[in-house]
Image (cartoon, helix red, strand yellow):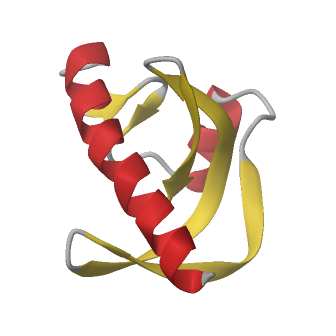
Amino acid sequence: MKALRAFALLSCASLWVVSAQAQDSAGGWNKAKWGMSAAELRASFEGRLIDADKPETVMINGSLAQCRSRLPNVEISGHRYTASFS
């Protein structure tokens, strides 16, 4: 199950990078911008952001990342994903 979750997050991260370049080349993705605080992210996504009870460690492109918040039901090219924020 952990391997499947890691694969899904890695797939999402890969698509997220491609989508981010297409949607916003000014240092972010959608309403998220690099350097935003958790409070700024929550305000930007107007209650859609879900905070984790505890950070989850995931492997993304060979590096460990701590995901603290998630945005479910992100549509990219007709597919739904969950975006994770650290």
| Left-right relation of 9 to 29 | right
Task: Look at 28% across and 47% down and name the residue there.
Answer: 14
Taking the image as drawn, is residue 86 in sight? no
Q: Nearer the viewer, residue 27 or 37?
A: 27
In this rendering, would 36 be left or right of 43?
left
Residue 19, horizontal then vertical, whole percent: 30, 26
Residue 61 placement (x, y as % from top left)? 21, 68
Q: Is residue 16 visible in the rendered structure shown here? A: yes
- Observer-nearest of 28 and 12: 12
For this rendering, which residue is in front, 23 or 26?
A: 23
Q: Is residue 63 above or below residue 31?
A: below
Location of the N terminus by quadrant is: bottom right
Task: Tell me which residue sits at (74%, 68%) in the image.
Answer: 52
Residue 59: horizontal and vertical position, in percent? 36, 78
Residue 61 or 36: which is nearer the viewer? 61
Q: Viewed as shown, does residue 84 lie left or right of 51? A: left
Residue at image position (43%, 18%) is: 77
Q: Who's the residue at 42% across and 48% down the image? A: 12
Is residue 65 depicted above or below 25 in this figure?
Answer: below
Determine whether 54 is above or below 77 in the image: below
